[in-house]
Amino acid sequence: MSKIIAIASDHAGPAYKKAIIEHLTALGYTCINLGTDTEESVDYPVYADKLCKAVTSGEAELGILVCGTGIGMSIAANKHKGIRAALCGDPVSAALTRQHNNANVLCMGARIIGLETAFAITDAFVGSEFLGGRHQRRVDMLESL
């Protein structure tokens, strides 16, 4: 469970980001906080870019992005080659996107889901592993797009 997880948010998510970092740290994960830490308006693509660069460089194994709905961060993250970002609103989707899509970035909406749900989604995401096999062919197809 020694995964290194990068986490970032825009102005809608710093409270969730802080709580998720505390939650993951208590479980033994190492977290890299890539901002923002205030509710002052910022541009979410800047934070998605920082996080995606941390994941694709190998600085972090996985990433978590939080904004108001999770949609903007998801769109921004998926612009990066090598990133497979998934917007998840439930733990089952979070586990399956790791298992089937080898997703490496989780996106969540702080204005959409409760914090306890965010913890459950986070746990399912970081606690699941890619299954490979027939799923690898599909991930390869995604990477070639």
Image: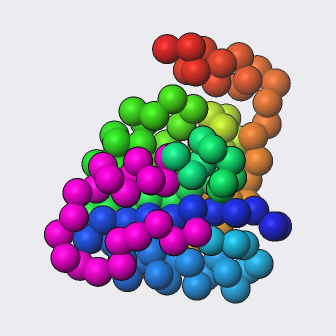
Check the image and report above or below for 100 versus 65: above
The residue lying at 73 percent from left, 80 percent from top is 27
Magenta residue span: 32-52
Nearest to the observer: residue 80 or residue 127 = 80
Tell me if residue 120 can be seen. no
Quadrant in the rendering for residue 44: bottom left
Label count reads 0
Nearest to the observer: residue 125 or residue 61 = 61
Quadrant in the rendering for residue 80: top left
Residue 43 sits inside the magenta stretch: yes
Check the image and report above or below for 22 versus 88: below
Nearest to the observer: residue 66 or residue 138 = 66
Quadrant the N terminus occupies: bottom right
The residue lying at 22 percent from left, 64 percent from top is 42
Measured as percent of width and height from the top left, residue 87 is found at 43, 49
The residue lying at 57 percent from left, 62 percent from top is 6
Measured as percent of width and height from the top left, residue 107 is found at 44, 54
The type of colouring in the image is rainbow
> Is 64 left or right of 70, judged from the image as shown?
right
> Is 104 left or right of 127, judged from the image as shown?
left
> Is 104 left or right of 86, judged from the image as shown?
right
Nearest to the observer: residue 107 or residue 115 = 107
The residue lying at 65 percent from left, 67 percent from top is 123
In the picture as drawn, the residue positioned furthest to the left comes out as: 41
Measured as percent of width and height from the top left, residue 70 is found at 34, 55
Tell me if residue 77 can be seen. yes
Measured as percent of width and height from the top left, residue 47 is found at 37, 57
Residue 139 sits inside the magenta stretch: no
Check the image and report above or below for 47 versus 120: above
Check the image and report above or below for 20 versus 122: below
